[in-house]
Amino acid sequence: MTEKQGKILDSAIQLFAKEGYTAVSTRSIAQKAEVSEGLIFRHFINKKGLLQSLLKRGEERLEKTILTIEELTHPKVILKHVISLPFNMDGNQKDFWKLYYSLRWQINSPELPLLDRLENKVITVFKALGLSDVHSEAGAFMMIWEGAISQMLTKKPKNAPMVFQVLIKKYDL
Amino acid sequence: MTEKQGKILDSAIQLFAKEGYTAVSTRSIAQKAEVSEGLIFRHFINKKGLLQSLLKRGEERLEKTILTIEELTHPKVILKHVISLPFNMDGNQKDFWKLYYSLRWQINSPELPLLDRLENKVITVFKALGLSDVHSEAGAFMMIWEGAISQMLTKKPKNAPMVFQVLIKKYDL
Amino acid sequence: MTEKQGKILDSAIQLFAKEGYTAVSTRSIAQKAEVSEGLIFRHFINKKGLLQSLLKRGEERLEKTILTIEELTHPKVILKHVISLPFNMDGNQKDFWKLYYSLRWQINSPELPLLDRLENKVITVFKALGLSDVHSEAGAFMMIWEGAISQMLTKKPKNAPMVFQVLIKKYDL
Amino acid sequence: MTEKQGKILDSAIQLFAKEGYTAVSTRSIAQKAEVSEGLIFRHFINKKGLLQSLLKRGEERLEKTILTIEELTHPKVILKHVISLPFNMDGNQKDFWKLYYSLRWQINSPELPLLDRLENKVITVFKALGLSDVHSEAGAFMMIWEGAISQMLTKKPKNAPMVFQVLIKKYDL
DNA sequence: GATGAATGAGCATTCATTCAT
DNA sequence: CATGAATGAATGCTCATTCAT
């Protein structure tokens, strides 16, 4: 990966996150990255290829975080870690998730195994806690999780820490 | 509103909901509606004007539903009605919400007073229930609501009714 | 067919004939035709569609000439008419044939039933003349025909009329 | 001439012959030759330079064949040799002639002294045979020759040997 | 000699939009 | 009200070519 390749990826994810994949032109990406437009296609074949590289890089960067959670053992600690994620994203993560969730609304939205791994871990937690319908419980939990990350990325609610506390209390974490 | 005007709106919202506002061309809308492309501009000035008409029509159609909720008085009945919304959408409503939520991820996402009215009603509920931090409680509730509608529109989880039950139980409704 | 549509076709065939299909840009066609570039695609879908329209128009224009020959009955008169064709082309015909023969050198060169009809007519002539291997005779005749038209279009030999006389004498016409 | 230089030339003439000079990208040549794209320009300056090298190499390879014909003395033997050429090409020759004749249809088509030498030899033959208008006779003969090579390269007529016989008989060779 | 990253002009095509009819 | 021809700017992408290594 050359330096310019990285600049293209950085510029692209910022623009995609802000304006949406279809609304961003390869020309504007090239300008922001200060490279020639042709270079995008030399490195990533086409616009969709650039998108896929972006998603792959985002997943790889999140891998560490997910792994940490997967290695946890105490049920309530796990849930707390999971539900904390939407409330503790750095800039890079925010851009990745904005890109991912904006794509989810379109046909052929990308797969994200990361989310399944998260849900699977949550399922094991509810099993450990002895709940009866663990899949529905996990489904509800991930639904809340998705509501949280959606609002954190689009509304930026000012009372987010308080809302977080409410959720924590609701699950007695 | 002429018949063709209606066909344009119907075609547009379906396409927008499926592929996203920017990804849909006025040409494809005209073809689906079986009208000339020029007619779109005669009736709605430009593509953005068409979008606004769509949002306005969607709001008007939801007005009745919201009004019904606003007129309810029993706290738990209100919450149950609100949280039920995402799980009971017809085709028209689904298309409207898909359009609205896909737009939310882009800059200059449209205002939707409807959501504020819903949240305000929820706030009065939590006040009535004697909770201390009603804004955070309502914030959390609407976060869950958004998670629910998001997943119902993008994931279509097969165990949705069970997940709904979990949420109902969580709020003791 | 609008006026501008005709101007596009006229400009296109002149440029294609002179510089070759691939070497000519749609932009240059639009400029020569004094229309916007987009109009080409509105009328002919894409560059290949424009080419096909050109070929179709060329065939239609030649139809009359071929029909005249097909209706002839006297063997030697027929051959003389056929072999005369390459030596008596007007500007429009020249452009069409230049386009057609330049395309023949590329893969997927277009079909031209006109040529088969011409060859079929020549076959009937040689049958009428009582020759034994009429297909080889017709094949040779059309080979000469193709040599004639090729040179008339690319070399413009100054002694063309004399060469024509030689061919006439060779077939005793 | 290095080994890679040869691979470039071989790849280029095959692609040029099949798809036409303008339609072939330097990139595709490099890929077929399994060399870097830059190497083409180091060796041949630019795409046109590559073309010229190709034409030069083709002429050199044909030199021997032409020389053999030029050294012949018996008139009918000469004509038979000349008219045989289009019907007896190996793969390399075919590619060269396809390239040459596809270029002839475009402006600035390359000179090919080889063809003039062939025609000059034919002129001497007709002189020797005591014909009156030797230039027109030679012109007609070369016209037929061009028709033959054109069809052999583009139509590949299945009865080519029979057609060849017809031509032989026509000139009483 | 050879590579491959990088360029910028140019390509075919699509876009939202205008306007005469 | 409605059409469809027409526009020009913008799009994603390819091109021949350069150059540091």
Image (tube, coloured by chain):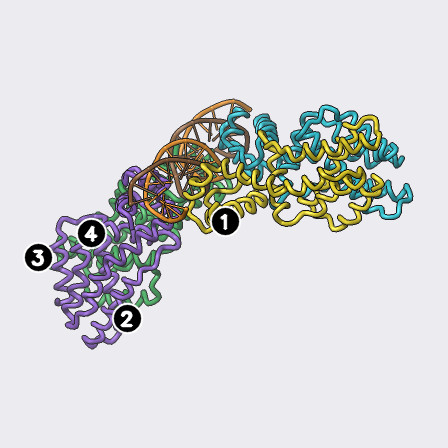
Chain colours: A cyan, B yellow, C purple, D green, E brown, F orange
Residue drawn at x 51%, y 26% as measured from the top left: A31
Q: CA distance from mark 2 to mark 1?
A: 62 Å
**Looking at the picture, how far across and down is residue A101, in whole percent?**
66, 37
Marker disc for residue D132: 3
Residue drawn at x 88%, y 48% as measured from the top left: A132
Q: Is residue D125 left or right of residue C111?
A: left
Read off the residue under disc 2.
Answer: C135
Marker disc for residue C152: 4
Determine the image quadrant of residue D128. Answer: bottom left
Q: Is residue F21 above or below residue C7?
A: above
Could you say which is closer to the camera, residue B31 or residue C19? B31
Between disc 4 and disc 3, the foreground one is 4
Q: CA distance from mark 4 to mark 3?
A: 23 Å
Between disc 4 and disc 1, the foreground one is 1
Between disc 2 and disc 1, the foreground one is 1
Asked if badges 2 and 1 are on one and the same chain, I answer no
Residue type indicated by callout 1: Lys
Residue type indicated by callout 4: Met
Q: Is residue C147 left or right of residue D128?
A: right
Marker disc for residue A55: none
Q: CA distance from mark 2 to mark 4?
A: 25 Å
Q: Chain letter of disc 1?
A: B
Read off the residue under disc 1.
Answer: B7
